[in-house]
DNA sequence: CTTAAGTCCTGCAACGTTGTATAGTCCCTT
DNA sequence: AAGGGACTATACAACGTTGCAGGACTTAAG
């Protein structure tokens, strides 16, 4: 029912191809012809059929963004920013939720997607390193993962340095028993490993001893995990006087446990998180955190994809690693 | 480069159409043939080309979800749930962010989308009523908007009743000066109007007088708006002893203002929100709220779309209005 | 005045898929 | 033994678009 090139051509009295040329901004079309065709296009309300265009050209104009979960404010924010950045290139973003399941991440990477996409921006949770090699030639940009010999471009902050900054902030306030919440054993939990490394580095730098009991594991990176971990920390014989949580949600969960047990923040326990989600700006006390430059991450990811895309699928080029800035945001939970 | 029906057919020694029949589960294919074809499919790693399929069949297998913003936990949650529900029907969800801009919402409704979609699930913010008539035949399901003579199906809770429940909860606790935060003048701000109506109804029911000074407007529905509105309320000559916020974010912002000014919650001011986002379960005090049955909203929206889709574009049928349950969740901010 | 280069437009073929039409085989009924 | 199904497989034509090759005409250069 919708008008096609054919209908426009008939109405304008030109060939189908000429209409196509007008639509695509081909240069050698006489102004008069162009005007006539444009009038017909407007009159019929012609809109190009993307399916046909894709079938012909191989490009869909759609990129996919795969995140572990949209419910997490950090990923929701990134998603919003990427949609905006993609829009500037008139790309549509298709958002996939992996729920951190290895199988779904693998499907994604192996191109077993239901829908054809030109590129993929991917924030892996279950997969790491070699497993992330894209089978077909679809360009991919990795977010937040730092692989030594990564098979794809990736954009991330320096997790280890940022974690060290956060921990250093706590040591500089004179705290001596500093716990970490969010430790994960899985070898693929690269983010957790890096933040742990940064935490340990900052402790060593301050001449503080490690206490394995203060390195609290967490199943997930949610409030509930932070609340549970904090409860376990408080039950220790000598509880910590500060906690570095590997993300803000963990920190907010921990804060809830602290406050509901009558522990003062930051009086008794100082608390710092990671991500700078909006929630932390309105909690009581407000939450100190490390703020990644999220808008820049989104912009760079889209730019990187655009570059790979315009270079043609053949132009591989070595995978690039882009570092994005972060900054420490001290709020009430540490310097109340 | 990827294998097509043609390649599989050649390898299996059958016609293209037979392969197509196998792929589509057509019944009358001899088991032996089917096995041979399947083997070829596996060997070549054949994946159907969606563009071609769509070109042929007119269906893309993609539905769009348009929300004002992904950053809001409520919408992020709904989005996640809808992606899950759509997956059960093997649909892909394309997420659009309107930022509440009328123009972008209009583009959406008028089908000026870049990408072909089979259906649209839409949570309008700037548009209301008549403006929401979809020009082309694309099925649409509206979320959270209640239009008297709506042009499309829609799924929502009874906003007015839910708001009344929230307010009634406050009156039942003996509060007499009950404020509302989130009032909006724009005629299209249907949600705000309905919640205000429910608030007023519950006040009247309890025999409490209206005080226009207690009906605080808010530019947006974010924490920052709630914080600002609460500050204005506290500056009144006789501040309220309870506040009904039109969503949880407003309430969390308000809570921040209260606590940072040393006002006790719920001791001095009881606070209730709306949406039941996760943040409210971990704030201190935890936030009382009205919880819409979000999973059901998502499921119904997808089901409704599926029905319209399978009925064919012609089968209009009268727009339907589905009501979803809500329940009051009393937490510390009212019954601390 | 010829040739070359540039401009404007067109027809054809192909992208990968599926609906329709059709033809042959086999078995069961009459 | 003839007719009528159900079963299996095929060929062909579209869906709407764009790349390619080329035709007709105009202008510039030799």
Image: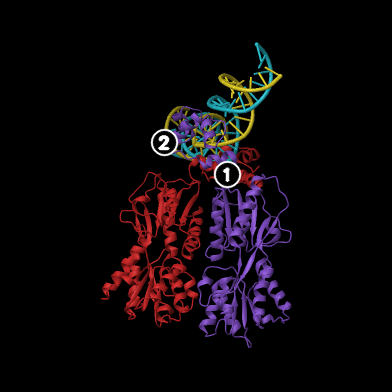
Chain colours: A red, B purple, C yellow, D cyan
Name the foreground residue: A4 vs A291: A291
Residue A157: x %, y % from top left: 37, 64
* Element on which disc 1 rests: loop
Is any atom of residue B207 visible in this view? yes
Report whether mark 2 lies on the same chain as mark 1.
no
Q: Image quarter for residue B212?
A: bottom right
Say if A292 sits above or below B105 in the image. Answer: below
Q: Nearer the viewer, residue B115 or B150?
A: B150
Return the residue at label 1: A49
Residue located 39% across and 45% down the image: A135
Is A174 positioned to the left or the right of A309 in the image?
Answer: left
Question: At which x and y percent is residue A225?
Answer: 44, 67
Q: Which mark is residue B43?
A: 2
Residue A35, image x, y percentages: 61, 46
The subunit letter for the residue under badge 1 reads: A
User: Of C5 and B313, which appears nearest the observer?
Assistant: B313
The percent position of residue B231, horizontal first and vertical second, equals 57, 81
Which of these two is toward me, A103 or A281?
A103
């Amino acid at each position: 029912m919708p008008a096609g090139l054919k209908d426009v051509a008939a109405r304008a009295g030109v060939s189908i191809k000429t209409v196509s040329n007008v639509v695509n901004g081909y240069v050698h079309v006489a102004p008069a012809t162009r005007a006539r065709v444009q009038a017909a296009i407007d009159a019929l309300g012609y809109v190009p059929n993307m399916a046909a265009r894709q079938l012909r050209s191989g490009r869909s104009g759609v990129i996919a963004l795969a995140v572990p979960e949209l419910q997490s404010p950090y990923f929701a924010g990134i998603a919003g920013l990427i949609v905006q950045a993609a829009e500037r290139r008139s790309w549509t973003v298709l958002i996939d939720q992996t729920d951190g399941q290895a199988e779904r991440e693998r499907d994604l990477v192996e191109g077993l997607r239901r829908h054809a996409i030109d590129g993929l921006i991917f924030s892996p949770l279950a997969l790491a390193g070699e497993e992330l090699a894209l089978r077909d030639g679809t360009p991919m940009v990795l977010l937040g993962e730092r692989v030594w010999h990564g098979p794809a471009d990736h954009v991330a902050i320096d997790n280890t340095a940022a974690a060290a900054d956060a921990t250093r902030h706590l040591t500089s306030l004179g705290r001596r028993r500093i716990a970490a919440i969010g430790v994960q054993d899985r070898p693929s939990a690269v983010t957790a490993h890096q933040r742990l490394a940064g935490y340990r580095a900052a402790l060593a730098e301050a001449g503080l001893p490690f206490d394995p009991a203060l390195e609290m594991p967490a199943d997930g990176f949610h409030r509930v995990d932070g609340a549970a971990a904090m409860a376990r920390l408080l039950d220790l014989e000598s509880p910590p006087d500060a906690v570095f949580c590997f993300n803000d949600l963990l920190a907010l969960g921990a804060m809830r446990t602290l406050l509901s047990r009558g522990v003062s923040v930051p009086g008794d326990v100082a608390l710092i998180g990671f991500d700078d989600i909006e929630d932390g700006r309105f909690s009581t006390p407000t939450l100190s955190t490390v703020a990644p430059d999220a808008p820049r991450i989104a912009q760079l990811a889209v730019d990187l994809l655009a570059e790979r895309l315009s270079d043609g699928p053949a132009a591989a080029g070595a995978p690039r690693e882009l570092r994005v800035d972060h900054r420490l945001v001290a709020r009430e939970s540490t310097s109340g």
